[in-house]
Image (cartoon, rainbow, N blue to C red):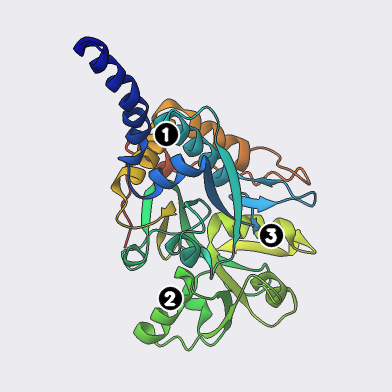
Amino acid sequence: MPVKNTLIAVLLTILPVIVDAAPGERSGTLQKIAHTRTIAIGFHESTSPFTYMTGDGTVMGYSYDIALKIAEAVKRELKLPALQIKQIPFTTQSRFPIVQNGVSDLSCGATTNTTERQKMVAFSNTIFVAGSRLMTRKNSGIKDFPDLAGKTVVTFAASTSEKMLRRMNSEHGLHINIVSTFDRGDTPLSVLQAGQADAYMMDDVLLYATIREAWRPDEWVVTGRPQSYEAYGCILRKDDPAFKRVVDQEIARIMKSGEAEALYRKWLLSPIPPKGVNLNFPISEMMIELYKNPNDKAFD
């Protein structure tokens, strides 16, 4: 065979290998997704309006919509003709382990970015900013955090609110009786409604959503000066800068394009499924600033 024809034959033989090798040059999560054509997205079943599941098994919410946009960005990055979404449910306690052990590639919910948590997982650019406040009965006499002295306060175990309540006790001697609950069984709302706690401390937007779930919503109020501001971010595995770059770029894009504000209006200023409840939670100045300057900074 002539040399020229031999060279052509060799090139035709190795070309598919070169093309197929390109995705293999990626590492970490992008490589996994390129190989499986699937992205595993974590979601919380009952953190309305961020991620939740309706009675018919549909997963939805503000954060979940952002996760789906990120999935589309990953699909474009990898030049995939199709990308399957694998939904991974998580609890407040399991959200970090399922990312660490690779069960979930990306979990977008209402998870606060803190420097302590950054030791376990990586955080995306911030997707929402909330303030930590109190939910209590209108006739409880509790107006602000100093009024909690000697009272019983319920919150989720392993939450930033639980950590702040313990700090209040140690630094200010408030002698707050802290009740920590989980996602299953007795929840903060059930404990509060049963009269086993005087107040429920959590992020303000979640408290507004909780009031809508209460037996008698008109009996409750969200009160108190925010003790901290919480920067919610999607969580992903540490030491995977290539995947984080794709995630952060997409969040920055939707923030600056106006798509993120449209999602805000859809989930926090409009009636949402399944009951058509409208949280009427105004866009804060901090959110407006975030749209202009996307970042992944923790507030602590």
Residue type at tag 2: Lys
Circle 1: element type: helix
Residue on which disc 2 sits: 163
Q: Is residue 78 left or right of residue 184?
A: left
- Mark 2 or 1, nearer chain start: 2
User: Which labelled disc corresponds to residue 211?
Assistant: 3
From the viewer's perspective, is the residue at label 1 or at label 3 nearer?
A: 1
Seen at 47% across and 54% down, the residue is 130
- Mark 1 or 3, nearer chain start: 3
Circle 2: element type: helix
User: Which labelled disc corresponds to residue 255?
Assistant: 1
Number of numbered callouts drawn: 3
Q: Are marks 2 and 3 in contact (CB under 8 Å)?
A: no
Residue 251, image x, y percentages: 41, 38
Residue type at tag 3: Ile
**Quadrant occupied by the C terminus:** bottom left
**Quadrant occupied by the N terminus:** top left
Measure the alpha-carbon separation of dots 1 and 3. Answer: 29 Å
